[in-house]
Amino acid sequence: MSINDFNVPGRFGERRYRIYWSTAVVNMEYFIKAKTTNGKVRITDASGLNVTLIGMTEENRKFTWNSKRAEYTGTGRVYVGVGSIGLRLTAETSGTRIKTSARPFSKKK
């Protein structure tokens, strides 16, 4: 699910952006720093990962980033044992734009 697609103006230098997705039971966020150089956006830092799950425990946390992409993935295991859901929050650069997306997806027990 695409959340946001925005332009990063080159004249402001490096800027900090909050990348997040929030529902009643799943909240995910982190911050990236990005700047435009030679007409292309590059991620210069990603940090501050925060994941809050209601009625679930988090497993398999992975947070990676490079100059073109930052991504959190993990698993939310439901307390009552009915299964788990996969979690993903991504920020990708393309030209002068940053596109953010979140993808909760079901997993088998």
Image (cartoon, helix red, strand yellow):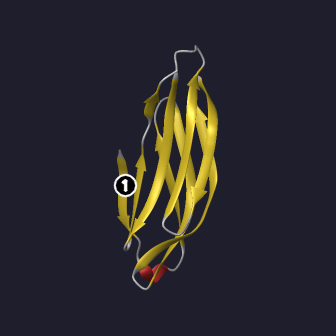
In depth, the one of 59 and 41 nearer the eye is 59
**Which kind of residue does numbered mark 1 sit on?**
Asn
Q: Residue drawn at (58%, 13%), measured in percent from left and top?
A: 80
Q: Position of residue 39 (x, y in %)?
A: 39, 82
Q: Residue drawn at (63%, 42%), measured in percent from left and top?
A: 61
**SS at mark 1 in the image:** strand
Q: Quadrant of the N terminus?
A: top left
Disc 1: CA contacts within 10 A as few (<14), some (14-19) or many (>=20)? few
Task: Look at the image and tell me whether residue 54 can be seen.
Answer: no
Q: Position of residue 51 (x, y in %)?
A: 60, 40
**Position of 79 relative to 34 (above/below):** above
**Position of 90 relative to 107 (above/below):** below
In depth, the one of 60 and 30 nearer the eye is 60
In depth, the one of 25 and 69 nearer the eye is 69
Q: Residue furthest front?
A: 108
Task: Look at the image and tell me whether residue 107 can be seen.
Answer: yes
Question: On the picture, is 52 further left or further right than 23?
Answer: right
**Position of 54 relative to 66 (above/below):** above
**Position of 31 relative to 28 (above/below):** below
Q: Residue drawn at (50%, 35%), measured in percent from left and top?
A: 86
Q: Position of residue 59 (x, y in %)?
A: 63, 34
Q: Residue drawn at (40%, 76%), measured in percent from left and top?
A: 9
Question: Picture quarter containing residue 5?
Answer: bottom left
Label 1 sits on residue = 4
